[in-house]
Image (cartoon, helix red, strand yellow):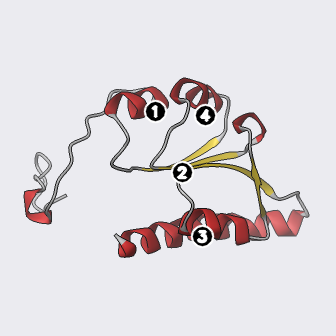
């Protein structure tokens, strides 16, 4: 679990760092980010980033970071349709209905306890 969290934090920081040079070069204001999820590494990393400003309202956000929680699937889906970016980190408490509403297409979620339980994609020679 800790490795997964560290990997997620690293991925988020990498994504934001790709855009940081452009933001800093133009002197643009910090990126407004709405965060929903537990206190922990992801939220801490976002709060420590100099070019990110956490906002309490999704309507004010340029990017929505949803870490295992989707507080208002329909409202957040509307915000994504309006052009806000989305980083979705799946968690055990999310339902397929919430994720489907947010993304705008049907999804199926199935918990797997061990890597050996993963199935192969149709036509894929390697496991998912």
Circle 2: element type: loop
Q: Position of residue 109 (x, y in %)?
A: 26, 40
Which residue has dot 2 on it? Answer: 37
Q: CA distance from mark 1 to mark 2?
A: 18 Å
Q: Would you identify the image quadrant in which residue 47 lies?
A: bottom right
Mark with earlier residue (3, 1): 3
Residue marked by disc 4? 80
- Residue 90 vs 9, above or below: the answer is above
- Residues marked 1 and 2 touching at CB (< 8 Å): no
Q: CA distance from mark 4 to mark 1?
A: 9 Å
Q: Is residue 105 left or right of residue 28?
A: left
The residue where tag 1 is placed is 103
Residue underneath mark 3: 13
| Point 10% across, 52% down: residue | 119
Label 3 and label 1: CA atoms lie apart by: 23 Å
**How packed is label 4: few (under 14 Cα within 10 Å), some, or many (20 or more)?**
many
Q: Position of residue 1 (x, y in %)?
A: 34, 69
> Which residue is located at x 88 percent, y 58 percent?
28
Q: Nearer the viewer, mark 1 or mark 2?
A: 2
Which tag, 3 or 2, sits closer to the chain's start? 3
Q: Residue 39, percent across and down? A: 57, 60
- Tell which circle, 1 or 2, labels the residue nearer the N-terminal end: 2
What is the x, y in percent for residue 23?
81, 63
Measure the alpha-carbon separation of dots 4 and 2: 18 Å
Residue extending furthest front? 39
The first of marks 4 and 2 along the sequence is 2
């Amino acid at each position: 679990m800790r490795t997964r969290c560290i990997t997620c934090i690293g991925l988020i920081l990498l994504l934001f760092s790709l855009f940081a040079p452009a933001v800093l070069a133009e002197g643009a204001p910090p990126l407004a980010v709405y965060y929903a999820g537990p206190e922990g590494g992801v939220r801490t990393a976002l709060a420590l980033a100099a070019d990110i400003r956490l906002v309490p309202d999704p309507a004010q956000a340029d990017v929505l970071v949803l870490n295992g929680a989707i507080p208002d699937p329909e409202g957040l889906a509307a915000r994504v349709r309006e052009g806000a970016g989305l980083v979705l980190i799946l968690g055990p408490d999310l339902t397929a209905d919430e994720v489907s509403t947010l993304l705008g297409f049907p999804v199926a979620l199935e918990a797997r306890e061990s890597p050996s339980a993963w199935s192969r994609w149709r036509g894929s020679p390697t496991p998912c």
